[in-house]
Image: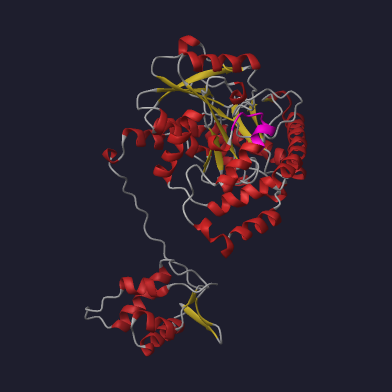
Amino acid sequence: MFEIPLSDLVLEKLQRQSEIPLQRQLYQIIHDAINTGKLAADCKLPSSRYLSKEVDISRITVSLVYERLVAEGYLYSKKGSGTYVSKMITPLKPPPNLSEPSPWVYSERGAKLLRNESSPPQPYGEFVPGVADIEAFPFYLWRKILAKYYSKKYYDLSSYAESGGYIELRRAIASYLSVSRSLHCDPDQVIVTFGTPQSLDLCARMLSDPGEEAYIEDPAHWATQSIFEAAGLNIRSIPLDEEGINLQDDMVTPKGKFIYVTPSHQYPTGVVMSAERRAQVLRIAKERNLWLIEDDYDAEFRYEQLHLPTLQSMDKDSRVIYFGTFSKTMFSGIRLSYMVVPHSLTHALRRAISNLYLPGMLHLQAAMAEFINEGHFYRHIKKMRTIYLERGQIFRAKLQEIFGDKVRLSPGKSGMHLLAIFDSPLSYEQFTAHAKHYNIVVRQPHYRSVSPKGLQLVLGFGGVQTAQIPAGVLRLQQVIQEAENALCY
């Protein structure tokens, strides 16, 4: 266990003008820190010589305090190694803070944000949607590349990021997208962000005013509504059909500002937007002076021969803002994403991201650029397409085998999740209350209008090992049966 900076805590708490002797004060500081869990089990304390010098107390005073705490069982000594916090002490839990801030503390937008659905408290477990397979990721390569840029040779990467992100990464992204997604873009149009929510927040702050409207798919990802509402926008949810978002001219008002869509693989239904519908939303965006945000969040994982063009590649009027992310292709915690924006917005948005967020992490961006340029990124995607295709097929087949006509599955053969609608009287809350005991963590589709009947679950298969899928589906069946049986009592 590493040595802790105990001297900082002692200097903060020590009262030299007090009548209480320094020895008693030092004892109480360390004793309380152990009891409250600030000093965890097996933490190594600094030597008595070092601590006495750092806090300007005699070494004999420090030694006596250490000896007393060892005698009382709070510390233990290893000959030739040092003094450590005992494993035998269980930290005392402070009483829960039951007081809630008064309603006036939050703004109206803040209150809406807290009422909306949020990310799950446990971001891991079986069938969590949107989670990539980290076991298949080449961490040995990634670690080697990352270590290279954390060396002294690249000390200049330790400062804040230049406007819009590291130029080599922007070049790599532009080159990759021009081939893989037929985008029309150059490095100046690429803006590196830290997660798609930041991309959306930046657009909402810079391109709209409170009271204006955003048109989003219904259902949509839970975060989309939260971010738009936090910016003061009014949400207009537009129904989906088998061709994607069904936005009509008479639905758009003079307050309209954004259309937000996931055309390649709609979240959560899996619908792929038709070519005709793509042309329709582009026309509406042009005629009604709207920004069209195209979130292409997991488009790399397509398993069908038909590849429809991106909205950005079809856009002749500079209305489309394209979103992409590495969180689905690499691993969730990387939180590295990007936007491709029209030339008219590049200067303003690059300046705004610097003013609002003061980005950094240039070492990470440099490593990502090399990972792409050396071909590791595309090789990983090709490998994962095969893996995810097999998993999706096995998952669908097993769900149909176990549940039969009591489950309906979303169409589309893309991405790492599917939407399952079970013929069950259970609510989502009743299901999750039982599912947590089996380490099953799922999502429900976020409808703003009336949702279809049945228990609706967004089930991810990206992070579930292929061999574990059949057993996982059986556990899913067991959870539903147990929850339904509980309703009868």
Q: Seen from this angle, which residue lies furthest bottom?
A: 60
In magenta stretch: residue 332: no
Residue placed most toward the observer, 42 or 172: 172
- Quadrant housing the C terminus: top right
Range covered by the magenta-colored residues: 176-185
Residue placed most toward the observer, 253 or 106: 253
State whether residue 52 appears in this view.
Answer: yes
Q: Decide: is 235 above or below 380.
A: above
The picture places residue 354, in percent across and down from the top left corner, at 43, 44
State whether residue 129 appears in this view.
Answer: no
Q: Residue at x 48, y 39 (%)?
A: 198
- Quadrant housing the N terminus: bottom right
Q: Residue at x 65, y 50 (%)?
A: 370
The picture places residue 31, in percent across and down from the top left corner, at 39, 75
Q: Residue at x 64, y 23 (%)?
A: 271
Residue placed most toward the observer, 123 or 5: 5
The picture places residue 33, in percent across and down from the top left corner, at 40, 70
Q: Decide: is 387 above or below 66.
A: above
